[in-house]
Image (cartoon, rainbow, N blue to C red):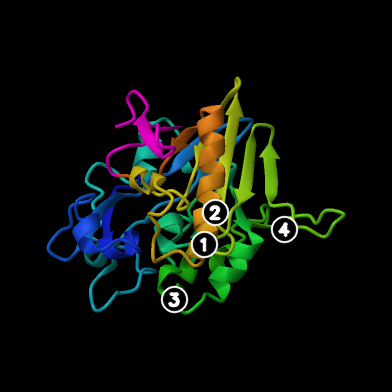
Amino acid sequence: MDGYFWLDGGRMFADLPKLKWQTICVPDDNNRIRLAARCYLIKGRTLTLFDTGMGNPPDPKFPKFMGASYLDFFGINQNDGNLIINLEKAGFAKEDLRFVTQSHLHLDHSGWNTYTNEEKKIVPVFPNAVYLMEDWEWRAGMNPHPRQKDSYLKENFVPLETADLDNKLRYLWRVKHDIDKWGRTKNKFQLEPGLTFIRTGGHTDGHWVALIESENKKAFLAGDLIPTHKHIVPGNLMSYDSDLNKVFGEKIKFLTKACREKWLILFDHDPDFTGGYVAKNQKGHFEFHPFEGGA
């Protein structure tokens, strides 16, 4: 967990009028709703971190937004610890991680990729890790659509391309998917047995999710395809999504699989639930059921 922050509620529920979405999430006086910045440490053959949260707000790499500091604009609250502190509480050091990735490169998912050191140089936070970047997402971050340009902060990822602290490690691995014999892109990348990243697109061009398989069970790291349990409803989309129709279709596809195979769905931004399961009710609609201890 990297704390909590606030975003405009209308943008989190693009197709719903305020009279509707404010009954789902209560806004503050600035029309914002409270969200979590969850990050997930995956323990397989190696340690892989999925998403790096908001980052350290006082870091000078963060610009001002509409005249307000990064901390104030997003209302960031890390009073219960940030990503690095919580990793340490769990018994892990920054040096322990082998791979770092994120569902996409928006600033609320990549904040702890880098930091400004004492020499005022932006360098990787995790000195022994290779940072995995979906290639479509790298290109989207480097040349963002005008609608999404404020969501990307290049200081969170561009320095990884040239960072080489001790000439021993290549920090950036841009994942390019193979093409099958019919000319179709294979959107799956298996990092190790039981850990597969799947490009969904939709939210951003290179958005990907993670599917973890262990002991005949599956966990699904949904990223911003399904940021909270309120977004289990396929029609609850965000104005941050670059392709609403794509997100809608991908949500139905993955939720159908999750329902059939009893996947544990883990959320990035839900302030109330870490995750849970989905089932279809008598009307055929998806319903959310939190897992025990998931609040």
How far separated are the C-alphas under marks 3 and 4? 25 Å
Disc nearer the start of the sequence (3/1): 3
Q: Please state which of the two labelled residues, at mark 3 or mark 4, is closer to the viewer.
A: 3
Percent of width and height locating residue 258: 52, 35
**Disc 2: which residue:** 249
Residue lying furthest right: 181
Pointer 1 with pointer 2, Cβ within 8 A: yes
How far separated are the C-alphas under marks 3 and 2? 21 Å
- The answer to whether residue 294 is above or below residue 185 is above
Instruction: Tell me the kind of residue under disc 3.
Output: Arg
Disc nearer the start of the sequence (3/2): 3
Which numbered circle lies on residue 176?
A: 4
How far separated are the C-alphas under marks 4 and 1? 24 Å
- The answer to whether residue 93 is above or below residue 112 is above
**Disc 1: which residue:** 245
Which numbered circle lies on residue 147?
A: 3
